């Protein structure tokens, strides 16, 4: 009962504060998802809601972020950031409301003195304390970055956990970036890297060179990079099959691959997009299109092609956006192998209020998959 009262107070304050001074801003982003295929009412409705309140005074901003789901109060975070003299400070304090328990506290500080930038990052978690000190500066053509890590749990003397030094400098005709790393055990490795080595008369082909030293090994790796320019309307997903070089064999460019094609064009106020992949999808990633990702939670990684129409225009009340996407499944059971239909709509009813709705239908299985209704309130 106490948690419900506290949660209600946060929501009331978040809405009530919108009527106060202009130094108080925030947003309330809520989505309600209805799954009619679920038997129980509790499983059919899911809620995601984030209430953000910002209080700005002087050069400082204090923020409260409250996350809610259908299970209740899931996360609470407080942040602060501002300027104190020559120092810029930020601080994040995170709690787990369900336990309840303290999760973490992180504070950073930065200052620039005589052209040299210094920083500190302090993190406190249950039974773990870490401190990272950084420094960077530029002297002529030489740039130096130093990072010193101190903290518990690493087993080093004086709680030392590691240090990384990055240096950038010109050498002959190239700009070189170098990194040297030490751990508790001592020296780990040092690298020297040159990027974008151009090939004469082949402006679309360049190489990156990475030289790495460890206490036991030394290696030099060349990695090709292709740039075929910008396609005006139809875009080909062009890749390269490359055998990396080793200490005993030379690298080899075997062949180019074209694994996908996409088309985007504007017809009046409507944008049409079509994308296809030539490689059968079995949970693997074959191109730069987001819908081909093999992310575990991505339901679209079994579709090899999609067509999409989208519009963004002004309605009677405010900006209106709408999109409709049809996905095609290899070996589907319906006409033309149509597998999924996905539609989304947003309408800004007022300056501070936006309404959104989404609908997903699994055509191949004949199931009404998901209906989402949500809104966003800002002040």
Image (cartoon, rainbow, N blue to C red):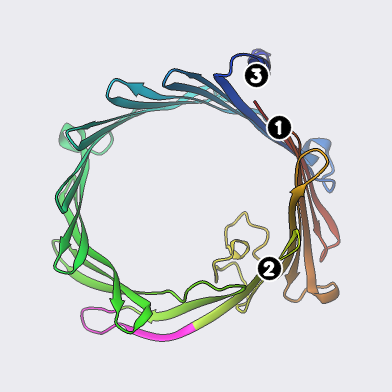
Q: CA distance from mark 2 to mark 1?
A: 30 Å
The residue under the point 26% across, 84% down is 250
Q: Nearer the viewer, residue 254 or 130?
A: 254
Kindly tell me whether residue 64 is visible in this rendering: yes
* Rendered location of residue 258, percent (x, y): 54, 81
- Quadrant the N terminus occupies: top right
Q: Which residue is mark 1?
A: 351
Label 1 SS: loop
The numbered dot on residue 265 is 2
Q: Is residue 106 left or right of residue 239?
A: left
Q: CA distance from mark 3 to mark 1?
A: 14 Å
Label 3: few (<14), some or many (≥20) within 10 Å? some
Whether the magenta-drawn stretch holds residue 159 is answered as no
Q: Quadrant of residue 70?
A: top right
Kindly tell me whether residue 151 is visible in this rendering: no
Q: Quadrant of residue 196?
A: bottom left
Q: Which residues are magenta?
A: 245-256
Looking at the image, tell me whether mark 3 or mark 2 is earlier in sequence order: 3
The residue under the point 47% across, 74% down is 229
Answer yes or no: do the residues labelled 3 and 2 have beta carbons within 8 Å? no
Q: Which residue is mark 3?
A: 18
């Amino acid at each position: 009962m106490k948690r419900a009262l506290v949660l209600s107070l946060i929501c009331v304050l978040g809405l009530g504060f919108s009527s106060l001074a202009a130094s108080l801003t925030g947003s309330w982003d809520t989505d309600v998802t209805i799954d009619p295929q679920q038997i129980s009412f509790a499983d059919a409705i899911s809620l995601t809601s984030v209430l953000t309140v910002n209080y700005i005074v002087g050069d400082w901003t204090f923020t409260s972020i409250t996350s809610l789901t259908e299970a209740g109060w899931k996360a609470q975070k407080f942040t602060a950031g501002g300027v104190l003299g020559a120092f810029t400070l930020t601080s994040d304090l995170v709690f787990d409301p369900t336990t309840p328990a303290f999760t973490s506290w992180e504070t950073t500080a930065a200052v620039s003195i005589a052209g040299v930038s210094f920083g500190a990052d302090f993190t406190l978690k249950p039974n773990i304390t870490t401190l990272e000190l950084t420094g960077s500066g530029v002297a002529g053509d030489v740039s130096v970055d130093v990072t010193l890590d101190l903290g518990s749990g690493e087993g080093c003397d004086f709680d030392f956990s590691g240090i990384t030094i990055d240096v950038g400098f010109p050498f002959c005709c190239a700009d070189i970036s170098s990194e040297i790393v030490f751990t508790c055990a001592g020296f780990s490795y040092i690298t020297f890297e040159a990027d974008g080595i151009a090939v004469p008369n082949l402006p679309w082909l360049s190489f990156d060179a990475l030289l790495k030293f460890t206490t036991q090994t030394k290696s030099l790796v060349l990695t090709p990079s292709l740039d075929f320019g910008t396609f005006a309307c139809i875009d080909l997903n062009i890749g390269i099959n490359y055998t990396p070089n080793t200490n005993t064999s030379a690298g080899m460019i075997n062949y180019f691959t074209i694994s996908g094609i996409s088309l985007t064009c504007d017809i009046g106020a409507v944008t049409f997009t079509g994308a296809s992949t030539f490689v059968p999808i079995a949970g693997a990633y074959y191109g730069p299109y987001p819908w081909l990702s093999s992310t575990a939670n991505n339901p679209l990684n079994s579709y090899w092609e999609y067509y999409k129409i989208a519009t963004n225009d002004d309605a009677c009340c405010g900006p209106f956006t709408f999109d409709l996407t049809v996905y095609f499944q290899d070996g589907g059971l319906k006409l033309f192998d149509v597998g999924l239909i996905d539609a989304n709509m947003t309408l800004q009813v007022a300056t501070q209020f936006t309404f959104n709705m989404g609908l997903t239908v699994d055509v191949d299985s004949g199931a009404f998959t998901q209906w989402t209704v949500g809104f966003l309130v800002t002040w």
